[in-house]
Every structure is written in C-alpha cells, then in structure tokens.
Image: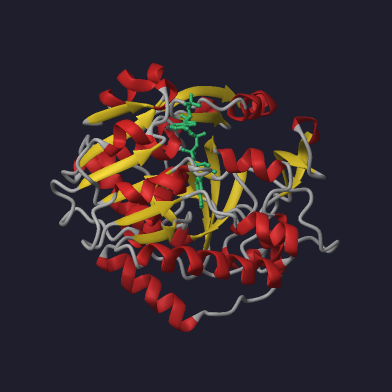
Amino acid sequence: MSSVRHLVYSRWLFHHAKPLSVNTSRLFSTTRSSMTIMPAWVIDKYGSNDVFRFTKNASFPVINYPNEVIVKVQAAGLNPLDVNMRSGYGAATMSMKRDPLNIKQSGSEFPLILGRDVSGVIMECGLDVKYFRERDEVWAAIPPWKQGSLAEFVVLSANEVSHKPKSLSHTEAAAMPYVATTAWSALVNTGGLSKDNCAKKRILILGGSGGVGTFAIQMLKAWGAHVTVTCSQNAERFVRGLGADHVVDYTAGPVEEPLSALEKFDLILDNIGGDTERWALNLLKPWCGAKYVTLVTPFLQNTDRLGIADGMMQTAATVATKALKHLVKGVHYRWGFFAPSGPALDEIRELVDAGKIRPVVEETFSFSEVPQAFEKVEKGHARGKTVVQISKGGEDV
Ligand SMILES: NC(=O)C1=CN([C@@H]2O[C@H](COP(=O)(O)OP(=O)(O)OC[C@H]3O[C@@H](n4cnc5c(N)ncnc54)[C@H](OP(=O)(O)O)[C@@H]3O)[C@@H](O)[C@H]2O)C=CC1
C-alpha cells in the first residue's frame, strides 16, 4: 500500500467507523444530486438467463459513507461468479453482508445488479476521500455483496478502488481486477508469496487458461517463479505465450501421472477443484512449508444449504479437518478467497504499466448484449476474460 494511501485510509478508519445517515449524498457534492435513475441490467429473481431485465430506471447509487466514491462505468468484466450469482449461488451469505443502507425499503436484494469488475471515471467523492478526485480514471473489483457494474454508475469504498493503469484502455482494465485481486489474495495473503521470495520457486497452477490462471501465470513469472500449468491441449500455445514454463494437457489422460514425474512444487494454486484434492497435495515438497491453495471451496454452498450459522460451522469443521490431515504429512492445505483491495490493485498497476502483465480479453460485448455475454461465460472454456463495454465503447474518455 502506498504510504499516502495507507495514512489516509488509517485516518478514515480511526475517525469514521460508522455511516453518517441515509441519503446524505447531497452533503458531498452538488453535481449529481439531481440524478435519481440510471440505465442498468437488473435481475428481480434468481434463475437462468431470462431473468435479466434492462431498465432505464434503476436507482442511482447513493454515497452513504464519507469514504465512498461514485464511478461512472466505462467497461465491466464478467466472471463465473456472476453466472452463479444470477442463479442464486451465495445468496444467504451475500444477504447477510449487504449494507442495510443500500437495500431498498423492501429489505430485498432485488433488483440486483451483477458485474464484479469495473473500469471507469470517478464522478463524485465522499468528504473524506483524499486519494481520489472527480474525473480520475480508476479500476476496481466490486465485492459480491454490493451492487455491480452492469449499470451506468456504481458506488464503492475508496479503499476498493485504484487508479487505472495508464497503458490500458477501460475495456482492457475491466478484464483484470476481480481475477487479479483473487489471485493476489490466494498467492500473496494465503500462499505467502511476494516479489521478494518467489525467485525459482516451483509453482503449479491447475487450470491456467481461464481468468485467474492467465493473470496468475503472468504475475508469478514477473516475480521470477518457475510456473507449471495444466490446461487443455488447445490452450497450450496460449498459456506458453503468457510465460508458462511447463504445460500439462489434462485432456490427454489423468493429469496426476505426468505431474508426479516432475520435481515437487512449493505451491499449488487450484482453480479446478473436484477430485484434484485427492492427488494434488502429494505433488508438494514435504516439510518445507509448501502450500496447496484452492479457490474452489464449499463455503457458499454450505451457507446456502444449511443457513449462515450451521453453514459456517460445517465449513470451519471441514477446513480444519483437511488442514490437520495434511499438516501431519508436512504440507499446508488452505482455502483462497477473493478479497477486494485497492492497495493490491495499486501494486498490480505497476506491473501492468511496466509491461510485465497484460490483460487477456477474449471477447467484448456491448451494453445491449449483456445476456449474450452471460451465455458466453456460462459455456465455459474461457481463454481469458469477457468484457461488456458500458459507455462510449469502453474507450478512454
Ligand atoms: N474462492 C473465490 O473467492 C474465487 C473462486 N473462483 C473460482 O476459481 C475458478 C477459476 O476461476 P476463473 O479463472 O475465473 O474461471 P474461468 O471460467 O475463467 O476459467 C476456467 C478455466 O479452466 C479450464 N479448465 C476446465 N477444466 C479444467 C481441468 N480439469 N484442468 C485444467 N483446466 C481446466 C477451462 O478451459 P477448458 O474447459 O477449455 O479446459 C477454463 O479456461 C472457478 O471455479 C471460480 O469459481 C474464482 C474467483 C474467486
């Protein structure tokens, strides 16, 4: 975290742990106070793609806390999570986390706006926002309990936002924040990797051709790691082009066989889940602090199925049992989660502007084509990211 940003944020936390009050946005700025509605794609219930509804009358976002900013969305990136959330995945946990000030009087999350990635321009700042100004170009990953970016405007905490890399268009920038902050959280916060300790470490990425994988390969290579990747045969050239040192084709047969023949790994990032846990931890160097970090966890299914309290207890019991089982064999078992973080995006911006990480935009859609964009993501077999251009074709303003 840059020292200026850290100071500003610490001061905000110390003085303003509580919201001001509902509908205080007029206190912060006069420019947008006359706007009460905006265009957006919303859902009014969970289901398949036909639940989408385009409206010009979605509620304009309101600044409820003095550290919030309103961003005019230029481009919005999609993730598998959006498709899952459209179908109701994680609804129990998200409802618990949602800010009551941002839920309409009905107490319901609907109409819900999806879209977890945003690149855009700051239109309005809360009184305590010091690190950003109106008209700044920014990018951010939006927490899933907040209204998303498939709309003309979105409100975010300033600590979730970062200045956009200058070298990227908004369309390119919107392809990165959610997968980048997820990979950062899994590899740095959970996996303990950093630019200073990565050199020559052997990392295995299970599932290298999707959003998280394409970002993780590039970041680890920028930090000097040796990166092995699993993907399907037709993605081999693609992941090698991003820097992967060794590629194993999972469609050619049980992938654990060729992987077992390789030198053991310091860290495994699992983007696939399922039966990978049965064999992947045997590929780690024992008694060396080696870690297996999986992004595919039962946490949200448990809370959806069992309710918050029982679901969380079940989740804690599962992860503790697995961690203990593998600890006695000398390796660490961990779950990785997306964590919104402007400061992480600040560091990632430097890698991007230095030309060490590039966005991988597989396909773009216009704002009128949001249902088609979801169909594309739902089909799977991603080779990078799907981006919706919300405003001015997602180009720089
Ligand atoms: N815990 C958390 O907070 C988060 C979890 N996630 C999860 O992480 C996972 C990855 O996310 P993301 O990268 O965005 O997903 P994507 O859909 O972008 O990518 C998945 C990739 O995996 C490939 N793939 C599928 N099966 C295999 C296999 N058996 N071995 C190797 N590659 C395979 C797919 O291509 P093909 O089928 O052609 O091989 C595709 O390229 C998802 O399950 C997602 O839900 C993501 C973000 C946050």
Q: Position of residue 247 (x, y in %)?
A: 29, 28
Number of numbered discs visible in the structure rendering: 0
Q: Is residue 81 above or below residue 99?
A: above
Residue occupying image coordinates x 41% and y 37%? 173
- Give left or right: position of 75 versus 2: right
Residue occupying image coordinates x 46% and y 23%? 362
- Give left or right: position of 174 versus 40: left
Q: Is residue 239 above or below residue 335?
A: above
Q: Is residue 146 above or below residue 150?
A: below
Q: Position of residue 155 (x, y in %)?
A: 58, 55
- Residue sitting farthest toward the bottom: 15
For residue 50, say whether it is visible.
yes
Residue occupying image coordinates x 79% and y 60%? 104
For residue 358, say whether it is visible.
no
- The foreground one among 213 and 180 is 213
Q: Quadrant of the N terminus?
A: bottom left
Q: Find residue 352 and report its image quarter.
A: top left
> How does the figure colour the protein chain or chains?
secondary structure
- The foreground one among 90 and 360 is 90
Q: Position of residue 27 (x, y in %)?
A: 61, 68
- Residue sitting farthest toward the right: 106
Q: Position of residue 25 (x, y in %)?
A: 64, 64
- The foreground one among 330 and 272 is 330
Residue occupying image coordinates x 72% and y 60%? 92
Q: Quadrant of the C terminus?
A: top left
